Image (cartoon, rainbow, N blue to C red):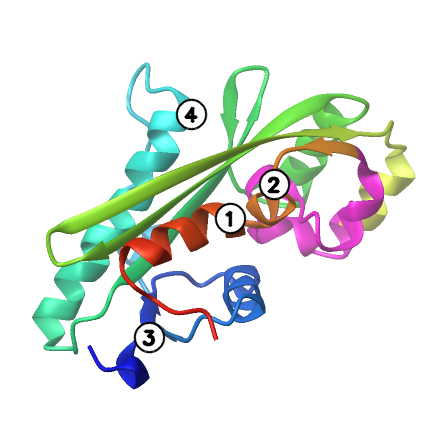
């Protein structure tokens, strides 16, 4: 590929992932997958029986990347590496996905109050048959949350589209007392691991 063509596809609807790629100077085009189960999602995100959280997020990231590769071929798009990612939250050994509604988000936040949880983000980059993956695991501690804290945050609607019912880069940043791991990974795209993958595909950072 000529240097001017060294862009990637981003197979994600997340504005946080777009921001993080721009932060490190990666040029990309969006390649959106369907995520609405009512209309038929492109990737089934149901965990398998006895599947560990780490295996699950890696499988999801690989599945999203592989689906995007098939779309590129089906639509006759120019061949470029495609980046996909998956983030999940783990509390007491259980996967915590996106909340169904505000009340569900409130229940999740009450559980996290004054406790530690983990955030796992897997990244996959694929080009034709080549797929490379990385995973980031971070620990996050919340302060004790009051019912008023939880009510105000849920009323903002910020938790509703986020794994674990919060975004660390938003208002919920005030809930976090300590992290161990990758801040960008908690946001949804661990930059150190992503750069390592991009280098395998000779993608420059501008």
Calculate the distance from the C-alpha at mark 3 to the C-alpha at mark 4. Answer: 31 Å
The reply to whether dot 4 and dot 1 touch (C-beta < 8 Å) is no
Of marks 3 and 2, which one's residue comes earlier in the chain?
3
The answer to whether residue 168 is magenta is yes
Question: Looking at the rendered structure, which numbered label has been put on residue 53?
Answer: 4
Of marks 3 and 4, which one's residue comes earlier in the chain?
3
Of marks 1 and 3, which one's residue comes earlier in the chain?
3
Within-10-Å neighbours for mark 1: few <14, some 14–19, many 20+: few
The reply to whether dot 3 and dot 2 touch (C-beta < 8 Å) is no
Question: Looking at the rendered structure, which numbered label has been put on residue 7?
Answer: 3
Please identify, in this view, whether the residue under mark 4 or under mark 1 is nearer the observer: 1
SS for callout 2: loop
Within-10-Å neighbours for mark 2: few <14, some 14–19, many 20+: many
The reply to whether dot 1 and dot 2 touch (C-beta < 8 Å) is yes
User: Badge 1 is on which residue?
Assistant: 192
Q: In this rendering, is residue 134 above or below 47?
A: below
Q: Is residue 41 left or right of residue 119?
A: left
Is residue 189 shown to the viewer in this render? Answer: no
Q: What residue span does the magenta drawing correspond to?
A: 154-177
Calculate the distance from the C-alpha at mark 1 to the C-alpha at mark 3. Answer: 18 Å
């Amino acid at each position: 590929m000529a240097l001017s063509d060294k862009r990637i596809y981003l197979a994600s609807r997340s504005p946080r992932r777009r921001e993080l790629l721009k932060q490190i100077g990666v040029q990309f085009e969006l390649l959106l997958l369907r995520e609405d189960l009512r209309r038929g999602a492109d990737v089934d995100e149901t965990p398998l029986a006895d599947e560990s959280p780490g295996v699950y997020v890696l499988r999801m990231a690989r599945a999203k990347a592989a689906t995007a590769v098939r779309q590129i071929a089906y639509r006759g798009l120019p061949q470029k590496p495609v980046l996909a990612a998956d983030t999940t939250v783990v509390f007491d050994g259980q996967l915590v996905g996106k909340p169904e509604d505000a009340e569900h988000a409130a229940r999740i936040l009450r559980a996290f109050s004054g406790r530690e949880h983990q955030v796992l983000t897997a990244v996959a980059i694929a080009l034709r048959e080549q797929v490379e993956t990385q995973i980031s695991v971070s620990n996050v501690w919340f302060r004790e949350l009051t019912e008023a804290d939880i009510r105000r945050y849920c009323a903002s609607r910020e938790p509703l589209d986020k794994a674990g019912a919060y975004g660390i880069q938003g208002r919920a940043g005030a809930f976090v007392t300590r992290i161990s791991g990758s801040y960008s990974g908690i946001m949804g795209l661990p930059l150190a691991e992503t750069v390592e993958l991009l280098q395998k595909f000779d993608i420059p950072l501008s």
